[in-house]
Image (tube, rainbow, N blue to C red):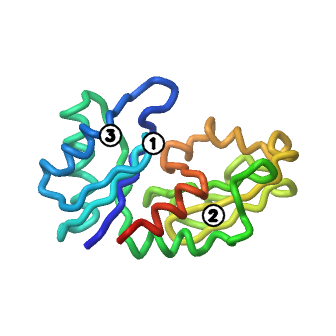
Amino acid sequence: MRYTALLRGINVGGTHRVEMKRLKSLFESLGYGNVETYINSGNVIFDTGDKPAGIGRRVAKSIEAEFGFAVPVLILSQRDMRRIAGAVPRSWLNDKEQKTDVAYLFLEIDTEKTIDVLPVRREYIDIRYTRGALYWNVDRKNLARSNLSKIASHPLYRQMTIRNVNTCRYLAEWKW
């Protein structure tokens, strides 16, 4: 089966540096097939017959051993990646006028109620839930008013990994 591993918090602000070539080799050494990485934010596409929960634990353990620090790893199937990307309205873009992101949720916070506790100002941001993710769109002129930047200081932030909508769509449309 085809999966995407989303690694949280690597190659951000000069910390937790992970070279994609080494990461690809690590996945191959674990016996995963057709391994591809996409951009430096920690997206790995691969094939395996293993169960998702076991993959996540195994990959996280191997990354810590190889790179010397813990990295939360979220494993999503090809079907889940496509379903999540498909939930985002096609008119929502990441361009000069609007900002659209997808926050993939770890199991502990995978509920629509997560929206209610985030410090965003709903009058400036359209934020929605689909199983496995939150996704939002904000007009860039309202970005500061939306309080979107405050998500990073919220306790639930550590249980999500965020990609812009372009990356979300690219991963969902990967040459599966």
Position of 93 relative to 23 (above/below): below
Spatial separation of the CA atoms under disc 3 and disc 2: 35 Å
Residue 131 lies, in percent from the top left, at 52, 71
- The residue at the point 25 percent across, 73 percent down is 1
Q: Residues within 10 Å of mark 1 (few under 14, many from 20)?
A: many
Which quarter of the figure has residue 10? top left
Q: Residue furthest front?
A: 175
Residue at horizontal 35%, vertical 55%?
Answer: 5
Q: Could you say which quadrant of the image residue 151 lies in?
A: top right
Question: Where in the figure is residue 56, as x and y percent of width and height?
Answer: 28, 54
Label 1, label 2: how far apart the Cα atoms are: 27 Å
Which dot marks residue 113? 2
| Left-right relation of 1 to 99 | left
Where residue 163 appears, x then y in whole percent? 55, 51
Give SS at disc 3: helix
Q: Is residue 151 left or right of residue 71?
A: right
> Few, some or many C-alpha atoms within 10 Å of disc 2 (few <14, some 14-19, many ≥20)?
few
Viewer-nearest of discs 1 and 2: 1
First in sequence: mark 1 vs mark 2: 1
Q: CA distance from mark 1 to mark 3?
A: 9 Å
Query: Tag 2, which secondary structure?
Result: loop
Q: Amino acid at mark 3?
A: Met
Label 1 sits on what residue type?
Answer: Ser
Describe residue 13's horizontal placement relative to residue 144 as left or right. left
Q: Secondary structure at mark 1?
A: loop
Which residue carries the number 3 mark? 20
The residue pinned by badge 1 equals 41
**Residue sitting nearer the eye, 173 or 30:** 173
* In contact (CB < 8 Å): disc 1 and disc 2: no
